[in-house]
Image: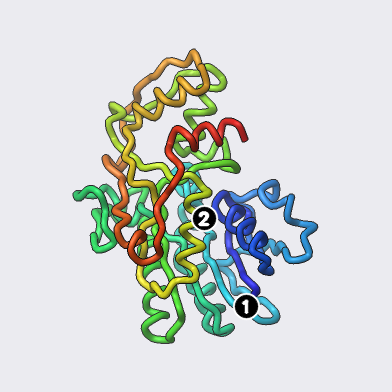
Amino acid sequence: MRYLVTGGAGFIGSHLCDKLIGEGFKVICMDNLITGSLDNIRHLVKNKNFIFIKHNVSNKINIKGKLDYVLHFASPASPVDYLKYPIQTLKVGSLGTYNALGLAKAKKAKFLLASTSEIYGDPLVNPQREEYYGNVNSIGPRGVYDEAKRFAEAITMAYHRVHGVDTKIVRIFNSYGPRMRQDDGRVIPNFILQAMKNKPITIYGKGLQTRSFCYINDLIDGIYKLMFSNVNGPINLGNPEETQILELAKKIVALTRSKSKIVFKPLPEDDPKVRCPDITKAKRLIKWHPKISLETGLSLLLSS
């Protein structure tokens, strides 16, 4: 079995490469390194079943030989990154997905799209089910990521319906673990970095907004199960244990034994007030649920 992982040098993509290599598959990792890092895959470079190709998937993708699966994970994924690279984010969600789907069609390969909970926007229902259409500001600053992923889902389903491509869509909720960049702007690495340096921990708004945090091992397990399922529509993967941001900050201060104080700043535009997955479908259709609690996951991350 031969797999292409776009965005394979990123946080989630590199862990997925690890999983596939560990299962004995051949892996082609493709990344333009705009937000990914060779450090994430350095341990795989000498593996005979692993190949790295530096390439921007928004341009045509050429792969010689057979492919059994195309896993499309290429995209800036944190607010810091997609606000810095708005055009690139839109292009990889549209042109990149088009190119990856075209490759899967040509190779008669299966296709999995890494989508996101951000397609729900600032949701008016909680928890979010796959049937919820979302509440997205298409012209707001976060719209470049939200709409890129919404388009990616639409074209993925179009290729499934029109061309018969065997497609999967995973809607990834907040995930964390080793290999997250400390400066990527997401809340857990932000808080840990600030706590480790005894600097003020920055909370936007009153910290009452909620997120659900899924440890990377659980997420990869869910993605792997989805890959080999007969599910073609979107599936939420995340931890339904909802946590307030203020509570998260206090947990990290306690775990790191930090002297950091908590400071509050204005809430950014369109920042979701709640974020929690309904994983009923994942439990029923792919027999998946997360096993690692937030406390355990944070401890694993801090010891890595």
From the image, tell me which residue sits under label 2: 220
Kindly report the distance in space between the C-alpha atoms of the residues bearing marks 2 and 1. Answer: 21 Å
Classify mark 2: helix, strand or loop: helix
Query: Residue at left 34%, top 22%?
Result: 264
209 lies left or right of 157: left
- Of residues 32 and 69, the one nearer the viewer is 69
Q: Amino acid type of disc 1? A: Leu
Query: Residue at left 66%, top 68%?
Result: 25
**Residue at the far top in the pictured view:** 259
| Residue 10 x %, y % | 59, 52
Query: Residue at left 46%, top 39%?
Result: 186
| Residue 300 x %, y % | 55, 35
| Residue 60 x %, y % | 59, 74
Residue 67: which disc? Answer: 1
Q: Is residue 145 something that shows in the picture?
A: no
Q: Amino acid type of disc 2? A: Ile
Q: Quadrant of the rendered structure where residue 155 is? A: bottom left
**Residue at the far left in the pictured view:** 124
